[in-house]
Image: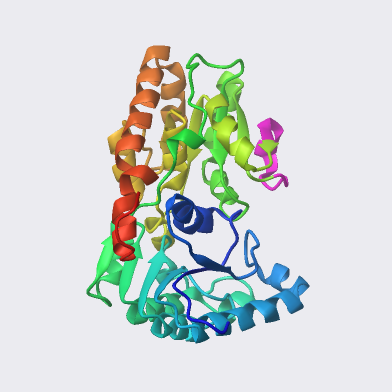
C-alpha cells in the first residue's frame, strides 16, 4: 500500500464467521463511510488444519498485515486478533501504527491459554488479547465481564453488546406446538458438544413428548445417541432468516467455565429476535438476558428436562407472550439501530445517518 489508509478494519475471519459478521461487517454495512477491510483469509474460521491447506494464502495474509501497518491508518478497528500465528506482535504493530486504534473482543480470550493441539498451544489467545488491550487507544468489550477484565489494563473501555437485526429474522407467528414438538439450536461445530451436557434431559423430553431437535449450522453427526432425534440444517443467511421461527423453543446450554462466563449470549439474542421462547444456562450475560425475557434458566443438568417440559406444557398464549415480548426488547436494547450511534462514537467516526 503506497498511501495512508483513512479507515481500516482488521478481523481474523470472513463474513461467514459469526463473530466477524456480528462485530464488524454488520456495523460497516450500516455506515455511510468507506472502510478498508482486512480479513485474514476470508474463511469462516482459522483452524490449524485449514491454515495448513492454504500456505500461499497464509503467506499473503501475513504480508497484507505488514502493508496495513505500513499504511498507518487514521482509524483502525481490530477485532479479536490480527493473525492466528501471532503471539501479539501483529496486534501491537497494527494498533500502534494507527492514529487512533480500537480493539474489540466478544469472547473471554484473556482466559484462552491454548488448550488443545500443538498449534493452539504455540499461539494462545490470552497473551495477545492482553497485548491488544494494552496498545489500543480504546477497547470495546462485548459485555460487562469482558469489560471488567479489560479495565484492569486500560482506562478507556466501553461496553457494546453483540447486536442483532430483528428485520433479518422471520418473526414467529404460530405458537401452537408442532407434532412432534421442535426444539432448536443454532451454532458452530465448536460449541455443538455443549448439547451433550443436557443429553439426558433431551432424551427424556424426546421419550415423553416425541420432540425432535433441529440443529442449524452443523451437518456432521457428532452427538452419539441423541442423533436419533436430531435433524440438521446447514447454515446460510436464508436458513438463519427462516429456520428459527419454525422452532417451538430454542436451547443454549453452556459449560460452567470461565470462558463461558465471557460469552455474549448471541444464541439467546437470535431466538428472541425471531420471537422464539428459549431455555439457557444462566451464566454471564445469559443471566441478564433470561431475566429480561422471562425465559427459564436451569442451573443444573437435572433442571433442564423440567424447564423444557414446562415451556412445552404452558398455554399457547403464554409462549406467545414470551416470544413477542422478547422480540420487542431486542428492538429497543440489542439491535444495531439502537447501538449504531454509540458504536460510531466509540470509533470516533463522527455523526452517522
Kindly tell me whether residue 341 is visible in this rendering.
Answer: yes
Instruction: State yes or no: residue 100 in magenta.
Output: no
For the record, the magenta segment spans 219-231
User: Residue at point 39% right, 46% down?
Assistant: 336
The picture quadrant where one finds residue 119 is bottom right
Quadrant holding the N terminus:
bottom right
Of residues 209 and 64, the one drawn nearer to the viewer in this rendering: 64
Vertically, is 134 above or below 316?
below
Vertically, is 38 above or below 282?
below
Query: Residue 66's spot in the image, x, y percent?
Result: 56, 85
Query: Residue 184's spot in the image, x, y percent?
Result: 56, 33
Looking at the image, what colour scheme do you see?
A: rainbow
User: Residue at point 29% right, 56% down?
Assistant: 351
Side (left or right) of 88 relative to 199: left
Which residue of the protein is positioned furthest toward the front in this rendering?
A: 3
The picture quadrant where one finds residue 203 is top right
Of residues 94 and 142, the one drawn nearer to the viewer in this rendering: 94
User: Residue at point 43% right, 28% down?
Assistant: 275
Instruction: State yes or no: residue 224 in magenta.
Output: yes
User: Residue at point 39% right, 62% down?
Assistant: 258
The picture quadrant where one finds residue 345 is bottom left
Which residue of the protein is positioned furthest toward the left in this rendering?
A: 155
Vertically, is 336 above or below 177?
below
Kindly tell me whether residue 315 is visible in this rendering.
Answer: no
Side (left or right) of 263 relative to 83: left
Query: Residue 156's spot in the image, x, y percent?
Result: 24, 71
Query: Residue 287's spot in the image, x, y percent?
Result: 31, 44
Amino acid at each position: 500500500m503506497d498511501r495512508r489508509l483513512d479507515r481500516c478494519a482488521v478481523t481474523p475471519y470472513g463474513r461467514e464467521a459469526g463473530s466477524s459478521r456480528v462485530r464488524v461487517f454488520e456495523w460497516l454495512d450500516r455506515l455511510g463511510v468507506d472502510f478498508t477491510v482486512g480479513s485474514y483469509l476470508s474463511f469462516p474460521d482459522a483452524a490449524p488444519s485449514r491454515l495448513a491447506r492454504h500456505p500461499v494464502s497464509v503467506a499473503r495474509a501475513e504480508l497484507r498485515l505488514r502493508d496495513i501497518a505500513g499504511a498507518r491508518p487514521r482509524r483502525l478497528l481490530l477485532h479479536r486478533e490480527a493473525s492466528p500465528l501471532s503471539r501479539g506482535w501483529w496486534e501491537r504493530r497494527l494498533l500502534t501504527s494507527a492514529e487512533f486504534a480500537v480493539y474489540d473482543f466478544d469472547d473471554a480470550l484473556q482466559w484462552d491459554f491454548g488448550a488443545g493441539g500443538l498449534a493452539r498451544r504455540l499461539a494462545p489467545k490470552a497473551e495477545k488479547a492482553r497485548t491488544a488491550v494494552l496498545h489500543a487507544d480504546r477497547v470495546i468489550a462485548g459485555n460487562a465481564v469482558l469489560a471488567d477484565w479489560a479495565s484492569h489494563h486500560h482506562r478507556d473501555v466501553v461496553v457494546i453488546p453483540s447486536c442483532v437485526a430483528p428485520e433479518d429474522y422471520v418473526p414467529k407467528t404460530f405458537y401452537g406446538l408442532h407434532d412432534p414438538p421442535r426444539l432448536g439450536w443454532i451454532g458452530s461445530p465448536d460449541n455443538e458438544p455443549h448439547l451433550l451436557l443436557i443429553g439426558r434431559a433431551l432424551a427424556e423430553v424426546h421419550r415423553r413428548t416425541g420432540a425432535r431437535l433441529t440443529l442449524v449450522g452443523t451437518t456432521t453427526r457428532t452427538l452419539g445417541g441423541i442423533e436419533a432425534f436430531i435433524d440438521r440444517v446447514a447454515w446460510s443467511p436464508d436458513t438463519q432468516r427462516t429456520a428459527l421461527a419454525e422452532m417451538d423453543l430454542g436451547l443454549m446450554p453452556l459449560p460452567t467455565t470461565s470462558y463461558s462466563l465471557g460469552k455474549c449470549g448471541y444464541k439467546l439474542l437470535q431466538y428472541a429476535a425471531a420471537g422464539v421462547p428459549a431455555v439457557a444456562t444462566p451464566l454471564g450475560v445469559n443471566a441478564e438476558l433470561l431475566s429480561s425475557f422471562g425465559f427459564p434458566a436451569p442451573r443444573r443438568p437435572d433442571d433442564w428436562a423440567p424447564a423444557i417440559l414446562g415451556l412445552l406444557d404452558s398455554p399457547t398464549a403464554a409462549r406467545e407472550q414470551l416470544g413477542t415480548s422478547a422480540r420487542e426488547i431486542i428492538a429497543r436494547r440489542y439491535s444495531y439501530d439502537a447501538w449504531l450511534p454509540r458504536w460510531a462514537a466509540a470509533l470516533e467516526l463522527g455523526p452517522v445517518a
